[in-house]
């Protein structure tokens, strides 16, 4: 069982859950369930969602459960948590050996912890092994917010919740280091001993990617997808990610306005996010910028494979730091033009030495790097970078990641 914000949320960790679930079917698990939220609740939260009519189906044997809220309006938020926890208790009551993986400490790890405690207290004697995976926003948004605001009690709860699991995992080495650093701050203030426990117990499990969706793409399919969008292979710059300040979208738009290549290479901004409306408004007079907010999972690798360059100038913000960069690894598998990005958070772990690196926030360097890639870089160098990138990214294939996270006894 995996507790996560699953599809249709546009989020790398929702994709992680799908990929782990699919591999589990090939590794002896005969009942795989994703425990997540009712779609109206996700919509009401304002999360960016994929087109509901174009979601890829899960394989037979995978069940996506969306328990309804328990209680009425007088319990505004806890109703959904009660629904998730209650359903998990039901699933744990059958005595079948079960592994429970949570992605996001808030609230999914707490849901699993509470369900296991309740099942044991009720005498069900669940045969369960729990794994808590700390993803980027657990640290950069939640724990760091607690520390900035001096809310050490809340930080203590989060770390206690994390360490209560049988296994504790981070999505990258950067995330692990941030967890330990946060724990040290809490220890210094509260006299606790979280940091040593995190140092001793936290391991790293990179995001699992379905490499088969990005490898061996039919060239005719790439050309057809680009034709439908009015694009030409190797003749556009691509940003495909969540449209948010922390992803460097404002830096990219400003840099593009100064680029020599803009007359020949349009900028395609593919995705949704909190900054989308503002970016649209500030670029409404620029007919060289194309917005695509309906790209589905089938079209994504085709757009990546056909671009002249892929830009993700991510930068640290108070509420978000790129703790890995799943889109970068996907782009590396799909091929296409070189990646231009920054060494922010864990992006260096995602790209290794296979990308063009600029300083985060350096708008002039961003424009210069993109101009050099699309106007001056020899085709032989581009192809060499493409091959190196694909070879490097194969370590993130979902089968390899699954087998490392769930070793066969």
Image (cartoon, helix red, strand yellow):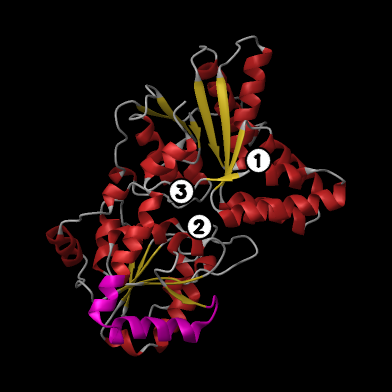
**Residue sitting at the far top:** 123
Residue 119 quadrant: top right
Residue tagged by mark 1? Answer: 201
Graded by Cα atoms within 10 Å as few (under 14), some (14 to 19) or many (20 or more), the crowding at tag 3 reads: many
Residue located 75% across and 47% down the image: 195
Q: Are marks 2 and 3 in contact (CB under 8 Å)?
A: yes
Tell me the residue that label 2 is attached to: 324
303 shown above or below 176: below
Residue at the location (40% across, 50% down)?
Answer: 396
Name which of mark 2 and mark 1 comes first in the sequence.
1
Q: Give the x, y percent position of residue 208.
A: 42, 46
What residue span does the magenta drawing correspond to?
A: 359-384
Image side of residue 103 versus residue 157, left or right: left
Q: Is residue 401 visible?
A: yes
The image position of residue 409, as x and y in percent, is: 47, 25
Q: Secondary structure at mark 3?
A: loop
Question: How many other residues sit within 10 Å of disc 2, few (<14), some (14-19) or many (≥20)?
Answer: many
Query: Judging from the image, what secondary structure is the residue with disc 2 in?
Result: loop
Q: CA distance from mark 3 to mark 1?
A: 19 Å
Question: Going from the N terminus, do you reach mark 3 or mark 1 first?
Answer: 1
Q: Is residue 366 magenta?
A: yes
Position of residue 276 in the picture relative to residue 162 (left or right): left
Give the dominant element type of the magenta stretch: helix, strand or loop: helix
How packed mark 1 is, by other alpha carbons closer than 10 Å (few <14, some 14-19, many 20 or more), is few
Q: Is residue 288 above or below residue 129?
A: below
- Look at mark 3 in the image and give the residue it sits on: 207
CA distance separating discs 2 and 3: 8 Å
The answer to whether residue 114 is left or right of residue 101 is right
Q: Where in the figure is residue 116, as x and y percent of width and height?
A: 62, 22
> Secondary structure under badge 1?
helix
């Amino acid at each position: 069982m995996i507790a996560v914000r699953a599809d249709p949320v546009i989020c790398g960790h929702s994709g992680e859950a799908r990929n782990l679930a699919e591999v589990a079917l090939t590794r002896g698990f005969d009942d795989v369930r994703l425990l997540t939220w009712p779609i109206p609740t996700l919509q009401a939260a304002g999360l960016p969602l994929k087109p509901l009519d174009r979601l890829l189906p899960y394989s037979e044997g995978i069940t996506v459960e969306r328990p309804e809220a328990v209680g009425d309006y007088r319990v505004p938020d806890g109703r959904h948590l009660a629904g998730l926890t209650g359903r998990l208790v039901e699933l744990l009551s059958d005595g079948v050996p079960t592994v429970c993986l949570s992605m996001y400490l808030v609230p999914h790890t707490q849901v699993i912890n509470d369900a296991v405690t309740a099942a044991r207290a009720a005498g069900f004697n669940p045969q369960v092994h729990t794994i808590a995976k700390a993803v980027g926003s657990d640290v950069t948004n939640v724990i760091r917010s607690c520390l900035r605001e001096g809310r050490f009690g809340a930080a203590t709860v989060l770390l206690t919740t994390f360490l209560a699991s049988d296994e504790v995992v981070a999505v990258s080495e950067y995330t692990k280091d941030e967890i330990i650093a946060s724990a040290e701050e809490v220890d210094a203030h509260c006299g606790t001993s979280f940091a040593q426990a995190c140092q001793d117990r936290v391991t790293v499990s990179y995001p699992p990617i379905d490499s088969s969706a990005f490898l061996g793409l039919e060239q005719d399919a790439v050309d057809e997808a680009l034709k439908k969008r009015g694009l030409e292979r190797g003749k556009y710059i691509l940003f495909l990610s969540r449209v948010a300040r922390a992803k460097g979208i404002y830096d990219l738009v400003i840099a593009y306005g100064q680029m020599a290549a803009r007359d020949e290479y349009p900028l395609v901004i593919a995705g949704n996010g909190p900054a989308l409306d503002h970016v649209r408004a500030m670029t409404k007079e620029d007919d060289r910028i194309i917005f695509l907010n309906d790209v589905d999972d089938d079209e994504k690798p085709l757009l990546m494979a056909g671009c002249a360059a892929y830009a993700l100038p991510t930068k640290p913000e108070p509420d978000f730091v790129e703790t890995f960069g799943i889109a970068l690894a996907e782009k590396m598998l799909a091929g296409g033009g070189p990646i231009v990005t920054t060494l922010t958070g864990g992006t260096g772990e995602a790209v290794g030495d296979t990308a063009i690196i600029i300083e985060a926030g350096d708008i002039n360097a961003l424009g210069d790097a993109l101009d050099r890639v699309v106007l001056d870089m020899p085709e032989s160098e581009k192809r060499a970078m493409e091959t190196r990138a694909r070879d490097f990214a194969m370590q993130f294939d979902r089968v390899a990641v699954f087998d490392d996270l769930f070793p066969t006894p």
